[in-house]
Structure formats: C-alpha cells, structure tokens
Image (tube, coloured by chain):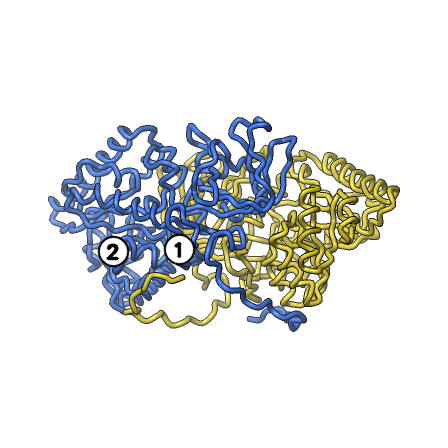
Chain colours: A yellow, B blue
Amino acid sequence: MSTLQTPVATTAVLPPRAPATSLAQLDTPALVLDRLRMERNIAAMRANLGRFDVTFRPHVKTSKSIDAVLALFGGQPGPITVSTLKEADHFAAHGFTDILYAVGVIPAKLEHVARLAGRGVKMTVLLDSPEAARGLCERAAALGARFDVLLEIAAILAAGGQNLAGVLTHAGDSYNCRSIAAIKLAALQERDAVVLCASRLRAAGFSCATVSIGSTPTALFADNLDGVTEVRAGVFVFGDLVMAGLGVCTPDQVALSVLATVIGHQKEKGWVLVDAGWMAMSRDRGTSRQPVDQGYGLVTDLHGAPIADLMMIDANQEHGILAHRSRDPLKTPMLPVGSMVRILPNHACATGAQHGAYQVVRGADTAIEAVWQRSGGW
Amino acid sequence: MSTLQTPVATTAVLPPRAPATSLAQLDTPALVLDRLRMERNIAAMRANLGRFDVTFRPHVKTSKSIDAVLALFGGQPGPITVSTLKEADHFAAHGFTDILYAVGVIPAKLEHVARLAGRGVKMTVLLDSPEAARGLCERAAALGARFDVLLEIAAILAAGGQNLAGVLTHAGDSYNCRSIAAIKLAALQERDAVVLCASRLRAAGFSCATVSIGSTPTALFADNLDGVTEVRAGVFVFGDLVMAGLGVCTPDQVALSVLATVIGHQKEKGWVLVDAGWMAMSRDRGTSRQPVDQGYGLVTDLHGAPIADLMMIDANQEHGILAHRSRDPLKTPMLPVGSMVRILPNHACATGAQHGAYQVVRGADTAIEAVWQRSGGW
C-alpha cells in the first residue's frame, strides 16, 4: 500500500495560539456545552430512575466524551451502552469495565469483542436472529471464547455454550409520540413486552438475569419498571429540539449549541448569514417530521438566552441562514456582522458528531471552564 | 481552563493491526474511493473546460484531501477554492500557494488570512456587502495589510486601499435544474451576469482581473465562457446521487461509496440491516427533493456493481436498512449476514465529512491502493 507523494510543505504551519478563555475568543463555528443544563438533565433522569430498583446504563453515543459520561456517574466509570466498538475501545482505555455493545454483532467483530473481554472488560453483545446466533457460536468456538449475549432467541445459544445474559428492547416508537400520556403508554408497553419475554424464557428453563429497556422519553417518564433490571438512554444528557418537540424537555434545557458568527445579511429577504452551515449543524432535520419544524435550529444569544422566533431556516456547507419563523423580513433582527449567536440543534447525537470537542461553559457565563474531547469514527 | 480528571486506564489500548490490503479486510463502515472513476470525472471536467481560456480553481471542500486535489492537477499543487480557513491552513502546509476563501470574510478572520499571506500564500477573500467592505478596510488598516478581494462592491474598497481582484458568482440554482438544457441555460445566465458586472466595474474605472464562476453542473455543461477567467467546481470530482438526479453524471460514475457489512434481516419486511447508518452516510437526503428519491443511497456489491433497485431506505445512528425500491419484501435479495456492500451517497461532501480517510481502490478491484487522509473541523 502506498500513498501519492505529496510535495514538501513550502509554508510553515501557523504557530498555535493561546487557548480561548471565553466564547467570544473562539474561532467559529464551535460546539458549546452548558454544563449546568447537562447536570440538571442528569439529575432529572436520576430522579425518575431513583424510584425504581434498576441499573442505569447510559448510552455514550450522544456525547462520545469521557468527561461527559463520568459526569453521569459522579466522576467515576459506570456501566455504559455503546454503538460502535471504537467507542468501546475508547471508554475501556479510560477505565470503563462494563460495556454493552447495543448493535447486532456479527462474527467478524467478535475477535474485537474478545480482545476487550481479555483485558478485563465485561462485554455484553446483542443478537436478534437465529442465523446470527449460529454465526456467533461458530466464531466463539474458533476463538475459544464465551460471550454474554442479550437477545430474544435462547435455544441455539445454550446449545452453543454461550451465556444468555438476558433480553433487551428499545422503544424507538416513543420518538413519534405526541404527548406525555402517549410516552407513558409506550413506556408501559416497552416494559410489558420485555418482561413477558423474560418470563417465558425463565418458564422454558433459561436464566435471564438482565431485562433491559431504553429510550430517553420512556426512561424519563416510566411509572412502572417492575421486572426491569436495566435502563439505557442517551440523548437526555444534552437534550435537543426533537426531544423538545416531544415535550420531553424545553428548548431552554438543551445543553448543546453551536457557536456561530454573523458574516452578512440579505436585508430584503430578512436573512442574517452566519458561519455555521450544515457541516457544523449536521444535516439532521428531525423536527421536520414534528408539528413544529425548527429548521436547522433555534437561535440564542451568546449567553444562551433565546432570540424570539429566530431560527436557522436553511444551510449551505459552511454558512447558515437565520430568519424569523414567520419569514416576514421586517421581523428578523439584523444582528451586526461579527456578532455571535448560538444555535440549538435538532439532534444532539448528529450535531455533536460534526465536532472534535466541546467548549464547556456554565449557564449564562461565557467563560470556558474546560474543553472535552470527543471520540469519533469506527 | 481545566478538564475533569479522568481515571488512569485500567486496560491497555488494543495493539495496532496490520493495515488492510483489500476491502474485505476492512472494519466497516469505511469510506471507499474508486480512483478510476475519479480520474474519469476529472478528465470530463478538463475536457469541457479545455475548450475555453479559463483557469480551473477546484473547490477542495468536497474531498478535503491533499492527494485527491493533487490528482486534479496531475500531481502538483494548483489554484484552489476553500470553504474554511482550516482547509486553507491544511493545503498551504502542503505547498498550495494560490487560495480563494469563498465564504464571506469577516474582520475577525482577517488576521488568520494575513498570516497565511505573510507565509507566501496568495490569498483572495470574498465580500458581499458595503458593511463587510468597511469592516475589512478598518481591520486591514490595523493589521497594515492589503487584501485581494472578489466582490460586487468596488467604491468602498478602493477608498480603503484594498485590491479589487474581480467578481465572483455561484450558480446555486443549477442544483434545481431538471434537464441538461436547463443547466446550459443556467450556465449562460451565470456567465452573462458576472461578465456584465465586470464590464460595468471596468466602465467605472475599476480594474477587474478575475471573473469567476462555478458550480459542478454549469462547469460541466457551459458552452460559452467568453469573458470568464476562472471556473470553480467541487463535487464533480467524486459525483453523487444528487448530481446523478440532475443528469450531470450516472450512478456508475460516482467514485465515492461507504463500505458496509450485513448484520441482520427482518425478512417479513424485506429488510437487510447493515452496519452503516446515518453516522457513516450523513443525514443528507438531497435526493428527497428530486423526482427520484434514493433514500440514504444506492447499493452496489463489493466491486461497485449495482444491485438492481436495492437502496438504503432508512438509517439509525449505526445501522442502515436496505430494501427494494418497490418495498415489496419478496424483491429484496436477502444478502447473507457478514457479506459486504457499498452504498453510493446522496451528497459526496456530506458523506465524506463523516470519515477521516479514503480507502482508495481502482475500478472493480478490491485491493486497497492507498489510504488518503481527510482534513476536517474549523
């Protein structure tokens, strides 16, 4: 394997500048995390789940940040859910030893799982078909490994010498609910389905220690978790406009935003142009399927205070168009060139993934308390 | 500034594996670039522009890759267009010395531009309002710098001692054309508008050396570039399904794809699940606004040959759902778990941005010829 020869640099790399100490000093666009809001979001989740005897196993795919996930556990590692083995590697390297890989595993990825397990990480994997179970058993035999598996299919695994750890479900339909009552119903259905499955497995003679449910809406609003042992949830930690559209949070509880600078205007259209486009916001337009479409996001000032009805109505790669929700050109405040705003995103997982780090602030204060790195890729 | 203390790693980082030598050995998802198709796309653009006396200044925001951009110039640096100053830094550090920053510049970014210029890079910036021009002149005076500026507004700049380098336009409307005839008309309008602007500036006594147009559709199909000195275009180098939907290329000319592995099925629905979701594809659904909606992408086999009417109809963060275009469950080929496919993307710029590197292959050969790194961030 080779790469094309590239010419020797003829210009020196720019010298590093001193780190920014406040938002106003940052190059934009930049990803901002309000730690105060995040801590309140964590407290709200803990408050609901504290009523039940369940393990909380947050999904780290939202933040992909060691610091943010430690904050979920009061500063120490705890049980986590991951969406990629890259995340598992990253968190294992920082002391996390109890990891659920919550995407159906294939035989080709089991060697990677086994290596993590061999280093002392309790890895749990997920299967959802007899074929996948057979494939796992074959590869496990070749590796001389025994995996902890969550699933609905038991007979094949037991025959293959693997450990049926339990059953898992995800109330994805809760993202389409239109009221808290509907979310509470979805939570009840999620709980009933997985508990029934566990009881049938036990009646058939299988152990089923783990009974795992999870989604931010159902985890926040569940009233009955009898028989459930574990709850997963991810996006609650930051919140976003899709969650706000469900009534799960309000926009002023959203902890994540993209800092942007005004770069121009098209006054006759009532447009304010900023230097954050879809590369910084992501192409996620999740609220377009909700009753209130928030475009590419809602605009706040530098301190996080909303600017009424100002939203990012469209985006190119590196610039966004801000306008009043009504599209009335006279109603858009013509923020001066050079002024800074923050944009609350449709979907925290997607927007976060466009950035390498979080600039951490606290509430309305624009001082940067910390910079938290994100993990990415596969 | 401080970061939270993170615990010392209790598990060693996994040892590096030998680099993959063919696609089948890669961890998925992974970004694949077919160099043969890319070279043909470059040749097609060169063939059209070779008929005119214009400078070609490709936009590097699509590939963000030194290797891919060198391939545009036969292996040597040439004049480029960038969408961020991070791209400018990256390409300047690799010997590119003629850079157009094609997003409206604000005073806060001029120091960065001046530093690049001070290292021998010919930097050209863009302005689109009198306010921005005034701001540039003020900051330029403070920096003791003189910038080359492309714009439509001349009087303010001349007064501020700056250099009016010329005029620039971008035929963004060409992305909404529904026929090659419509694209040719858009190209003519683009050319006419910018040439008229240049002639008026010259009539008013201003020099206007650069007359710059650009968009992939108009650059590929322009028949008349009289008076134009420079052409920019970006996405043509890879092509994508949005461009195919315009008739600008065909799906079998698209050089970029995402390699994915089948991880499961939902047979009753006719679904094949793969381990590439929106994180790997991006959330870009550009074809949803075109006559033929291609979902999250069209599926090919490992060698790049299309699998008829198989597309990614929906995506979660880390898995995608493949199904037949008709949604008839019986028509979806139930590709076995573990088999690999490639997904052609809606929008090459957006999909590329989700990855750190290109796995470079040639045509139907799955041997990896090279790994090309991408630049990212801001």
Q: Position of residue A58 (x, y in %)?
A: 69, 54
Count of all numbered marks drawn on residues in the image: 2
Q: Secondary structure at mark 2?
A: loop
Q: Nearer the viewer, residue A122 or A26?
A: A122
Could you give the CA–CA distance between mark 2 and mark 1, rounded to whole angstroms? 40 Å
Toward the viewer: A101 or A117?
A117
Give the residue type at disc 1. Answer: Gly
Say if residue B152 shows up in the picture.
Answer: no
Between B15 and B284, the residue placed more toward the observer is: B15
Q: Which mark identifies residue A338?
A: 1
Q: Which residue is mark 2?
A: B74
Judge if badges 2 and 1 mark residues of a common chain: no
Residue B112 image offset from top left, x and y in percent? 34, 64
Q: Mark 2, chain letter? A: B
Name the chain letter of the residue that bears numbered label 1.
Answer: A
Quarter the C terminus of chain B occupies: bottom left
Crowd around label 2: few <14 · some 14–19 · many ≥20 (10 Å): few
Q: Which mark is residue B133?
A: none
Q: Is residue B243 above or below residue B124?
A: above
Res A247 → quadrant:
top right
Residue B319 appearing in the image? yes
* In this picture, residue B349 sits left or right of residue A174: left
Q: In the displayed structure, does residue A15 sit left or right of residue A287?
A: left
Residue placed at 74% from the left, 35% from the top?
A: A181
Task: Mark 1: give few (<14), some (14-19) or many (20+) Cα within 10 Å.
Answer: some
